[in-house]
Image (cartoon, helix red, strand yellow):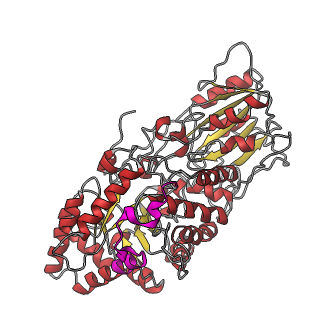
Amino acid sequence: MIQAEIGNATPGEAGEFALGSILNGGGSSPGGNKQASLDDWLSLADAYYDAVVGQERFADAIPMLWGTDAVHGHSNVYGATVFPHNIGLGATRDGDLVHAIGVATAREVAATGLDWTFAPTLAVVRDDRWGRTYEGYSEHPDLVVEYAGRMVTGLQGDAGGAGFLGQGRVLATSKHFIGEGQTTDGQDQGDAVCSEEMLRDVHGGGHRAAIAAGAQTVMAAYNSWLGNKVHGHRYLLTDVLKGGLGFDGFVVSDWDGFLQVADDPAEACARSVNAGVDMLMVGGEWRRTYHDLLQQVGAGNVPMARIDDAVRRILRVKARAQLFSGSRPSQRPAAQDSNALGDPAHRDLARRAVRRSLVLLKNDGVLPLRRDVKVLVAGDGAHDIGKQCGGWTLTWQGTGNDAADFPTGTSIFDGFAQAVPHNGGSVVLSPNGEFGDEAPDVAVVVFGENPYAEGDGDRNHLSYSALDPQPLAILRRMKERGIPTVSIFLTGRPLWVNPELNASDAFVVAWLPGTEGAGVADVLFCGPQGNVGYDFHGRLSFSWPRHALHTPLNVGEAGYAPLFPYGYGLRYRDNGEIGVLDESDVAHGLPALDGTRGDGSTYPRCPVAAEPDD
């Protein structure tokens, strides 16, 4: 019932305590090396397996589960394919694509000897100030419901089918149960103040679909509902999830989430387990939790029947995952697939996902670009794969990464460099937008949010230029010189960008596209024969704000009046003129948030994922 982090529990310790599970938290890897090789991952997986199964004092040793946050591809692993974050997949409106990404991700996870991914995230995001907005597919539950089952079956296979949890498949997680997208002011780990009908009808549909598709694990949410933490909420976890919905897998806590249920760690442990948490994910002090749980059972505070139920559920899932086959991780058939990590077919799939996720907000006749033009590519996002991948990429926050960390990835600039020079044009990279005596035919400015994850991304307004005015300055300089401008916006949520829209002849939302940034150029340029090669396909799965404080903003609500509505997205055939927009920034002077919750305490940190200064 205890899950420890690999940075805090050696294989020997895992065997000594007979731990049921381990995880690698965000930014954690074998030896603390984020460029660890496939062999490094397999060797460590074998070490844990041998340490637990090889304990002579157990007549029938029980293999452990290894879980990981493969939330947009196997994104903790060097050389893996990193797909667009969920907000971009929401824009594709393509369930088949989502399923295929699940299949590819499972294959890469299984190749490293791991068993389980903490995905998909099924949050229905109702306030875009939330730092986890990009982890949600949409503000509308219907799209989340459609995608939930497709991703789960992609990862696990079809429940009841011959290939269910077979070779190249991994356990999926329906997370986070429930209501995290409804918190007041979009505050991470905050309180969802809503009716049970809202919780059921808006936030429950994705979880129902995931469970119906056979999801074997559910992760409890950090948030509260009407003031009560979900980790300690027996009605939600036991009566509704396990009872009403018939979920027969197991519930895992989020990172130290059970410790938020009570001030005393032992009491928090007991209350969470009694509420229905079956496995406790412990960030650091797992030995304390181990002894706390034993003490609470011995004192009669946790009934043995509850322990038996939790263990039965965990063993059931391990059996379904075929962990009792007797094979070390490196000897499993999926681990023999040494070409799975970063497979060119997966990269092609990721590039297709980028193409289909792009949303065109404005086009005053500039796009598509001819391939024989002189292009200036500017902006700090133009040649930065780490920035275009966002959070949960090699490190927890997605920061501290450079080109060497993505050996097979392509930046957005790389796509332009592939598209233009061999077709009579030229392309120059100039992050600050400077150029010599010869003016370009067009300037493409790539900019947007820097990587973040969880509460570190919480905001109190949606103004982009209030925090980063440099891209707007570049765009305006180009306009003053009479140079047509194209903006490519990297973002994990809709943001107020009226000044940038006014300064752009075309404006493309690329979300957080992952490692295959070259897919952007595929759409922006004409095909080899001068016709439209790839048209824009993406449509907004989140409504776009009219001003910097225009949130919550969700389709179907009273007074709904977005700048661009849910489902908006231009095609090349459309009239892309939008007129001059109001540039009054109502967020002027508001400070940025500092990563603390409303009560002044900090968000739970991942000690093994400390970020370097950069």
- Residue 211 colored magenta? no
- Looking at the image, residue 70 lies above or below residue 360: below
- Picture layout, residue 549 above or below residue 70: above
Quadrant where the N terminus sits is bottom left
Residue 89 appears left or right of 597: right
Question: Where residue 81 sits in the image (x, y, percent)?
Answer: 54, 51
Q: In x, y percent, where is residue 574? A: 84, 49
- Asked if the magenta segment contains residue 331, the reply would be yes
Question: Residue 534 vs residue 609: left or right?
Answer: right
Return the residue nearer the eye: 107 or 397: 107
Residue at the extreme top of the image, as rendered: 437
Magenta stretch, residue numbers:
314-339
Residue drawn at point x = 17 percent, y = 73 percent:
56
Question: In this orientation, does residue 597 appear?
Answer: no
Task: Out of 296 and 564, give the one closest to the viewer.
Answer: 296
Q: Residue at x 44, y 41 (%)?
A: 399
Predominant secondary structure, magenta span: helix
Please count the marks in the image: 0
Residue 320 position, x and y percent, is 42, 78
**Residue drawn at (40%, 33%), measured in percent from left and top?**
614
Left or right: where 233 falls relative to 334 = left
Q: Position of residue 416 (x, y in %)?
A: 69, 34
